[in-house]
Each structure stands twice: as C-alpha cells, then as structure tokens.
Amino acid sequence: MSEGTYDSFCPVAKACDVIEPRWTLLILCELWLGTLRFNEIRRGVPGISPTLLSKRLKDMERRGLVRRAEINGGELGYETTPLANELQPVVNALGKWAHRNLDMDLSIDKPDARLLMWKIRRKIDTNAFPRRKTTVIRFTYPELAEEQRNYWLVARPGQPVDLCLLDPGHEVDLFIRADLKAMTSAWMGWSSLRTEIDANRIALVGDQKLTATLEKWMVRSIFATAPKQQVAA
C-alpha cells in the first residue's frame, strides 16, 4: 500500500486520498470565501505554518484542486478549480452536520479572537453603513491579554473591510465590548446577538444607527441558520 493513501478502488477511499490531508478542507473553505493571497489564507487558517501551507497548496495544485491565478496587477494568488468547486456543497453539508450534532461547549472551549474577527470582517454588510464616510468599529474582549484584546474594523466606501490589530487612528463610531465566548456563540448561531446583549455579555456604545442595525450588518456564519438536532424525549 502506498504511504498516506488507502490504495483502494472504493470511491470514498479515493475521495479521502484527495481531501483528507490535514488543512486541505480548511484551505478550500478560505478560497471559496474569496481569499486569494497566501498571507490571507494563513490568517483564515491559524495554526498552519508557512512551510506547511506552501506544501499543502502545491499538493492541492498537483491534485487539480487549486491553480495559480493573477490578481491585482500581476500579483499571483490562488483559486479553486471546477473539480474543487464540486466539493463545496458537500463540505457545507459537513459543517451543518457538525453544527447540529457536536457539542457546542467543546467547540468554543478555546475561542480564537483573531480567527473570529477575521471571519466577522469578511461577512460585514457595508450597505448598512453611511455611504460617504469611513466607518470604524472597535471590538474589545476584556478577558484577553492587553495586546490581544482590541480589534478595529475599518469600512471605507467602495473598499473591502479592513481588520486592524493596532489603532488605525480614526474616530471610532461604535465600541463593542464582549465576552469572547459569548461573541463566538452568537456569531456561530449557538445563541443570538440579542440574547448575549440582554445578558450583558455583549455591550454596545456609540452610533445609535449602527447599534440598532447590528443584526443586519453583522452577518453571522452560514452555519448560524442550521437547526440543532432534535432529540426525542
């Protein structure tokens, strides 16, 4: 048997040979969400080293899952192939299955603020923001170490939302102070933003319009709408 493969004619085994190497599916998820650059993939897949990410991307390219793509004036990035795109509904279904059936407490036992903020940033609906000005929202997770607790989302008209780990120097329109597990739970859909706000685990101070429309512009995870498994009494 070849090392690292099932060496079987079974179609499921053949599929596993392609998608099982660690990080493969998470990298694909990042690419499907529009991440194209190497460093941005790393931000969306924390824990993977640059060396391993480079190796995995080369393996995925060899297997026909990704290809090099030219982005923004000749810069090279990555994109998924039609072969990989056939997997997207399968992977989404796998995520919904996990969301329905796996223990939520285990899922957020070790929340990751940087990963959460990267994912929140990507799904912000800027249509709810003022059209002619930069909108800045500061998130603070007070239980974290000082150098890890503050994050700024900067939304400039007509541009993607930026995530800043250092104060960008703009006037802040809305301050959000939250327990990290509470924000993770609300964004993932294990609870709701309103529930966490009412329980004083999330607090908002600042622009009243942004506060009132929070649930509109802070678009939650695609898994937030997946119903939990109904267990018979």
Image: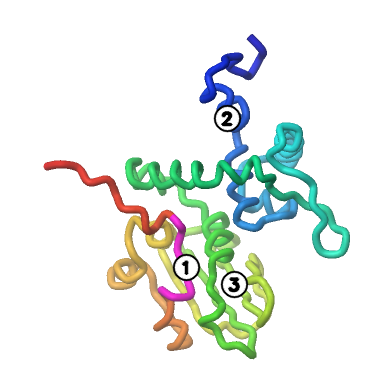
Give the label, 2 or 3, closer to the camera: 2
Residue 204 at x, y = what percent?
Answer: 42, 78
Q: Residue at x 57, y 88 (%)?
A: 130
Of labels 1 and 2, earlier in sequence is 2
Q: Count how many numbered circles sit on residues in the image.
A: 3
Q: Residue furthest right?
A: 74
List the residue tagged with mark 1: 219
Q: Is residue 189 above or below residue 154?
A: above
Of labels 2 and 3, earlier in sequence is 2
Q: Helix, strand, or loop for circle 1?
A: loop
List the residue tagged with mark 2: 20
Query: Can residue 56 be seen from the camera position used here?
Result: no
- Residues 65 and 206: in front is 65
Q: CA distance from mark 2 to mark 3?
A: 34 Å
Q: Disc 3 marks which amino acid?
A: Leu
Question: Which residues, given as a range, are shown in magenta?
Answer: 215-222
Tag of residue 153: 3
**Left or right side of 204 for 59:** right
Q: Disc 1 marks which amino acid?
A: Val
Badges 3 and 1: C-beta atoms under 8 Å apart?
no
Residue 124 at x, y = what percent?
Answer: 54, 70
Q: Is residue 73 above or below residue 115?
A: below
Residue 83 at x, y = what percent?
Answer: 65, 40
Q: Disc 2 marks which amino acid?
A: Glu
Tag of residue 98: none
- Residues 135 and 114: in front is 135
Badges 1 and 2: C-beta atoms under 8 Å apart?
no
